[in-house]
Image: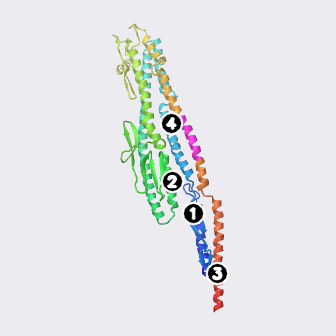
């Protein structure tokens, strides 16, 4: 082996260990970056030389710099992310729905409905009492106000969900554009023989964010370009990117592509929004409508059969003017003159049979084999059950998410202690290579001195 070969091997080693030190230093610098994947400089022997019938070693080189990444864990995280995000969003939204009802409380519909029927029971004892008649009107107005408040709150929540959906879809479109751009940059770097580890980390982060929004599918081609679809609809690849919007078709919110292809969502943040917007809140509004349409019709039917205490008395009077979409209107004539409240069944003064009959409506099975209050309580109970289920699901998926994050960290995370050990090892190797340069230089100086 010639002195020039020793110089070449030593000089090459200096460069290799300098790069290895840079890799370890970069790892330490990113030790607090949760989206960074630990990089590793893989060393291998340089291609040996053949001279004089002998094979001479040519030193060391860096084969490549790889990311430490576990694809299986990545897939598990992206499978759990939409479940966790859906549970979290659903828990928040169901909590808002619960708050709209204010149950159980003195101001809730259940309590106010009881007050309404109790006011009729009290009126039946003293049918001609002006104060008790006014109490009936007041309890009906309180009930009407609360029904309107609940209906308005649910309607506003639904409107807010649509606003939130549009904002999230805007973020979705931006993320898809970013994945497409990163795909292109990764392809260019790879084609140039570079290892774009930082770009790969950035793309993985964006894809993880996308997985929180809905059920996505990710595949990779031979050039390591990612093709992403959401809800079974193509989203982006290296060259193309789709754009999505929210469609409201007869009250059904749907994620659609620019080609008007509907994505079939079954998990994720967007799924929770679309499901509660399209199904949960409309079903609850429909249940409220059914309850109070029945309530209005039943009270009016009984009240029409009674006689007022006007002079002259009148019959066939509706207590409620109408009910529609959360608006329960009292008969304005009764609000103006409580003598029009019809409680006598035979027209005689002091008869309160009709008031008793209206009060008895509280115990009659009028909807689905249930009383009005029981039917309403069932609705509230179902909301509570759904909120509880979402909370339990969130607890479970959060635990899984934390476990997966720990596994990812143990594989891809940076151990400062380990990197410091690597730095010391590379530093010693660098120093040894530098000494070999000095040795080769001294040999060369000796040789020159011998021939001069």
The x, y position of residue 239, in whole percent, is 41, 57
Of callouts 2 and 4, which one flags the residue occurring earlier in the amino acid sequence? Answer: 4
Q: How far apart are marks 2 and 3 (CA)?
A: 49 Å
Q: Quadrant of residue 29?
A: bottom right
Count the numbered circles shown.
4
In the rendered image, which residue does mark 2 sit on? 205
Q: In this view, does 159 lie above or below 195?
A: above
Which structural element holds mark 3? helix
Q: Give the range drawn in magenta.
A: 387-402
Q: Residue at x 57, y 63 (%)?
A: 26
Which structural element holds mark 2? helix
Of callouts 1 and 3, which one flags the residue occurring earlier in the amino acid sequence? Answer: 1
In the rendered image, which residue does mark 3 sit on? 440
Q: Which of marks 1 and 4 is in front?
A: 1
The x, y position of residue 167, in whole percent, is 42, 46
In the rendered image, which residue does mark 1 sit on? 26
Q: Do the residues labelled 1 and 3 touch (CB within 8 Å)?
A: no
In the picture, measured across the screen, residue 344 lies left or right of residue 415, that is left
In the rendered image, which residue does mark 4 sit on? 95
Quarter the C terminus occupies: bottom right
Q: Is residue 68 magenta?
A: no
Q: Does the magenta stretch include residue 388?
A: yes
Question: Which mark, by number, is residue 163?
Answer: none
């Amino acid at each position: 082996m010639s002195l020039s070969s020793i110089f070449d091997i030593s000089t090459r080693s200096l460069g290799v260990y300098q790069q290895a030190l840079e890799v370890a230093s970069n790892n330490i610098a990113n030790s607090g970056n949760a989206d960074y994947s630990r990089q590793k400089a893989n060393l291998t022997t340089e291609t040996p030389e053949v001279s004089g019938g002998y094979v001479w070693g040519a030193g060391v080189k860096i084969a490549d710099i790889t990311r430490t990444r576990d694809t299986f864990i990545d897939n598990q995280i992206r499978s759990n992310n939409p479940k966790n995000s859906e549970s979290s969003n659903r828990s928040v939204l169901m909590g808002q729905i619960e708050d709209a009802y204010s149950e159980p409380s003195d101001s809730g519909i259940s309590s106010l409905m009881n007050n309404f029927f109790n006011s009729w029971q009290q009126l039946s004892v003293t049918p001609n009492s002006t104060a008790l008649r006014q109490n009936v009107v007041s309890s009906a107005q309180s009930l009407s106000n609360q029904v309107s408040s609940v209906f308005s709150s649910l309607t506003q929540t639904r409107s807010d969900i649509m606003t939130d959906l549009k904002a999230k879809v805007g973020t979705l479109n931006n993320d898809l554009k970013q994945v497409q751009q990163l795909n292109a940059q990764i392809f260019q770097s790879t084609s140039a023989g570079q290892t774009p580890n930082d770009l790969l980390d950035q793309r993985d982060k964006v894809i993880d964010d996308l997985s929180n929004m809905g059920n996505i599918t990710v595949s990779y081609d031979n050039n390591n370009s990612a093709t992403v679809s959401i809800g079974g609809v193509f989203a982006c690849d290296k060259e193309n990117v789709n754009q999505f919007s929210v469609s409201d078709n007869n009250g059904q919110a749907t994620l659609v592509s620019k080609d008007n292809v509907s994505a079939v969502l079954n998990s994720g943040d967007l799924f929770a929004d679309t499901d509660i917007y399209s199904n949960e809140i409309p079903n609850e509004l429909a249940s409220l409508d059914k309850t109070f349409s029945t309530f209005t019709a039943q009270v009016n039917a009984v009240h029409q059969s009674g006689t007022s205490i006007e002079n002259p008395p009148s019959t066939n009077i509706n207590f409620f003017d109408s009910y529609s979409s959360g608006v329960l209107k009292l008969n304005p004539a009764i609000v103006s003159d409580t003598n029009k409240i019809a409680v006598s069944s035979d027209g005689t003064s002091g008869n309160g049979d009709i008031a008793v009959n209206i009060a008895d409506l509280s115990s009659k099975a009028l909807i689905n084999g249930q009383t009005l209050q029981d039917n309403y309580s069932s609705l509230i109970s179902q909301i509570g059950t759904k909120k509880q289920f979402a909370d339990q699901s969130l607890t479970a998926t959060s635990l899984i998410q934390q476990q997966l994050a720990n596994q990812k960290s143990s594989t891809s995370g940076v151990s400062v202690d380990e990197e410091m050990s690597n730095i010391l090892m590379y530093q010693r190797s660098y120093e040894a290579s530098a000494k070999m340069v000095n040795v080769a230089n001294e040999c060369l100086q000796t040789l020159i001195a011998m021939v001069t």
